[in-house]
Amino acid sequence: MAGLEPAPTAGQLGQRLSVLSVNGAALPISRILCLGAHSDDIEIGCGGTLLKLLDERPGLAVDWVVLSASGERREEAQAGADRFLTKAGERSTSVLDFRERYFPYEGAALKSYFDELGTRSSPDLVLSPYLRDAHQDHRTVAEIAAATFRDHLILEYEIPKYDGDLGQPSVYVQLSAEQATRKVALLMDTFATQLARPWFTEETFRSLMRIRGIEAKAPDGYAEAFHCRRMVMS
Ligand SMILES: [Zn+2]
């Protein structure tokens, strides 16, 4: 009954691409847009990738958007951007106050914000939450990002959580052991308000990067993984 079997995913087919290069040819990335629903999403999901990109290409332009953060979480969101983007060139940080956990009901306001964002930012790479993320805020951001940045490369990062929604990614970014360690240290140093949460530990972040590193055959054993729904090569 081959007709009923699901189509193989990109990962099953072994079509694993590097965000920095494909078969040795560098991707033309000069501006990155990072989208996070909440304070710490970007850093957890793709902090290592950003450190690597900026290690290898210092001076990259980065636009950093956190859609919901207030009080101490707002300060941490700003600090996270500052610490992860020390090697960036032109950069902007936007921390907004959309209502946390209610993003599906804030759709019109979010869409208007993204319409405006789409006119002022033309990134070569968008780093976004995952469309099938179990958190409704993350999903909403992914949906609106895909509708806004139709002609852009979007890589959707993953965030471990109670819901157990980690899937089978198709894109991996290999990290050095130093980059993985630096990511974890920055997370623990920046997000003091999260340290009481049982899952917010060095072990959580390191273990996911280690598993993705196995899948990516990373020389140092660490990687971050992404979902890519559409990639156009010319
Ligand atoms: Zn989040």
Image (cartoon, grey):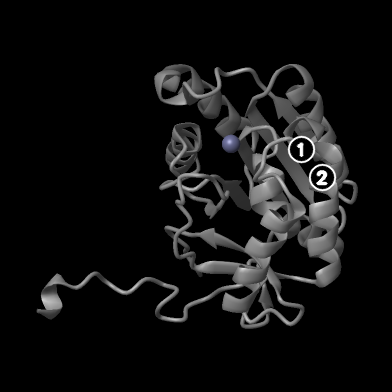
Q: Amino acid at mark 1?
A: Leu
Looking at the rendered structure, the kind of residue marked 2 is: Met
Q: Residue at x 63, y 82 (%)?
A: 217
Task: Determine the residue positioned at 79% across, 36% down.
Answer: 191
The N terminus appears in which quarter of the rendering?
A: bottom left
The residue at the point 77 percent across, 78 percent down is: 220
Q: Is residue 88 above or below residue 21?
A: above
Specify the label residue 195 is tagged with: 1
- Residue 150 rendering spot, x and y as whole percentages: 45, 46
Label 1 Cα crowd, 10 Å radius (few <14 / some 14-19 / many 20+): some
Q: Distance between the Cα atoms at labels 1 and 2?
A: 7 Å
Q: What residue occupies the far right of the structure in this picture?
A: 86
- Asked if marks 1 and 2 touch (Cβ < 8 Å), the reply is yes
Q: Name the one closer to the observer, 7 or 183.
A: 183
Between 5 and 59, the residue placed more toward the observer is 5
Question: Label 2 belongs to which residue?
Answer: 188
Residue 158, image x, y percentages: 56, 52
| Residue 32 showing in the rendered view | no
Element class at badge 1:
loop
Q: Is residue 106 left or right of residue 41?
A: left
Q: Quadrant of residue 96?
A: top right
Task: Return the disc, 1 or 2, that comes first in the chain's sequence.
Answer: 2
Secondary structure, mark 2, is helix
Q: Is residue 71 visible?
A: yes
